[in-house]
Image (cartoon, rainbow, N blue to C red):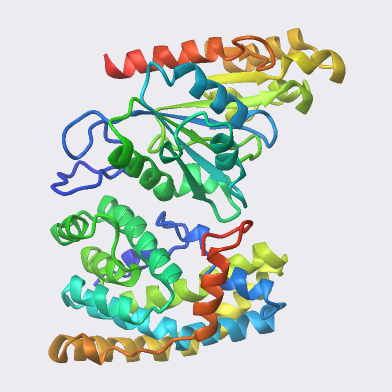
Amino acid sequence: MHLDHHLESSAAVSADARRPDGTRRALRIGLGGPVGSGKTATVAALCRALREELSLAVVTNDIYTREDAEFLLREAVLPPERISAVETGACPHTAIRDDISANLEAVEDLEDEVGPLDLVLVESGGDNLTATFSRGLVDAQVFVIDVAGGDDIPRKGGPGVATADLLIVNKTDLAPYVGSDLARMAADAKAARGELPVILQSLRSEDGVREVADWVRERIAAWTA
Amino acid sequence: MTRAALLVLADGRFPAGGHAHSGGAEAAVRAGRITDAASLESFCRGRLHTSGVVAACVAAAAALGVDPGQLDRAADARTPSPALRVAARRLGRQLMRAARATWPSPELDALASRFPKGAHQPVVLGLAARAAGLGPLDAAYCSLYEGVSGPATAVVRLLGLDPFDATGVLARLSDDMDRVAQEAVETGERVVTDGVDVLPARSAPLLEIGAEAHAAWAVRLFAS
């Protein structure tokens, strides 16, 4: 719940577009999706594609380890002070939807400590097809599925597939090996999502994250306009 | 006095970060001290009568309007484990955010200015209770109930304990919670007149030691 209440002191309450000092806060984009679909790989690729042009930070939500944060650190996609890990108590969807306080604090601490930031990527722990982000935490959300998880996922739909601002169908390079029909996945996604965009990507190919990076650039342009 | 506001504040779904914490239960499960409903009940009863009493007294005193800075220092002095102090402040910060959004109040705003990274959770809980129109007894009950419902929920996830058994444990602790809540209010009232030194300093060494060990684990489900 967001009340129209004047907050004199530090710490914004939730989705306010301005920070307590009056400056515009960073755009926050959430990435969710099933375990192993390529959320962390997509975050890493986005960081590499955008870090020269934008001031970036990442919040990871690992379920029981710090592996995702450690992967990003090991890959050196961003300096360590720009990567923060939130612990979720066995419920990744709770931390991004029902009780977003730990994630909001991670985002705000990053802005305080390494800001000003243009963009914060909030990566959910791997979850199921019903996981969505609260609008109090992120301004836009990306749902990442992959062809190896079964080409019937777009048809099955669910809140992530149907309502995310962007649906990524990842690992298209694997389609021939796992018998997934990309055309059918694209058509089913279109049917489930209407006008909402779908991007099929393979991070194995040169500049594989380009289309998603362009989508992020459009969101940034709209946010700062 | 509003009873409905008490239900809002005490609800496990109140979005103040508690879901990520086990109240020491994860460390106790790993150490083999919690294995079933009976040992969960012993663990919760022990927590209730040690760190639980201290937290409830602090919450009641805060709800009576005792200076939060003094209470925060008193809570620090009664929490030997650095990991538990960090967890208490983190949860306090999360509760502060949720309470300010739910029951806007100048007192909570002042607390946020003074402790931007969070005060001990029971201090914030007492002020949240005030902001919600609740009294010290309500604050004490909320503190005590959270202190045992957190571990009970965590053990359902950690051991696959039957959720009905875990809820039965909470029900069997009701009489203890009633008595401790009354005691906390009496102590809180004494703090108003005699200062924070009259707060009890009970602690459970295994909770403190377990928290330090747990904070160093590479793989864990809960933040504390």
As drawn, is A143 to the left or to the right of A54? right
Q: Is residue B174 visible?
A: yes
As drawn, is A46 to the left or to the right of A104? right
| Image point (74%, 7%), residue name | A183
Q: B133 or B47: which is nearer to us?
A: B47
Q: Position of residue B27 (x, y in %)?
A: 61, 71
Quadrant where the N terminus of chain A sits is top left
| Image point (67%, 81%), residue name | B33
Q: Quadrant of residue B105?
A: bottom left
Count of numbered badges drawn on the protein: 0
Q: Position of residue A66 (x, y in %)?
A: 58, 48
Q: Quadrant of residue A24?
A: top left
As drawn, is A7 to the left or to the right of B153? left
Vertical side of B195 occupied by A184: above or below? above
Vertical side of A9 occupied by B62: above or below? below
| Image point (24%, 92%), residue name | B198
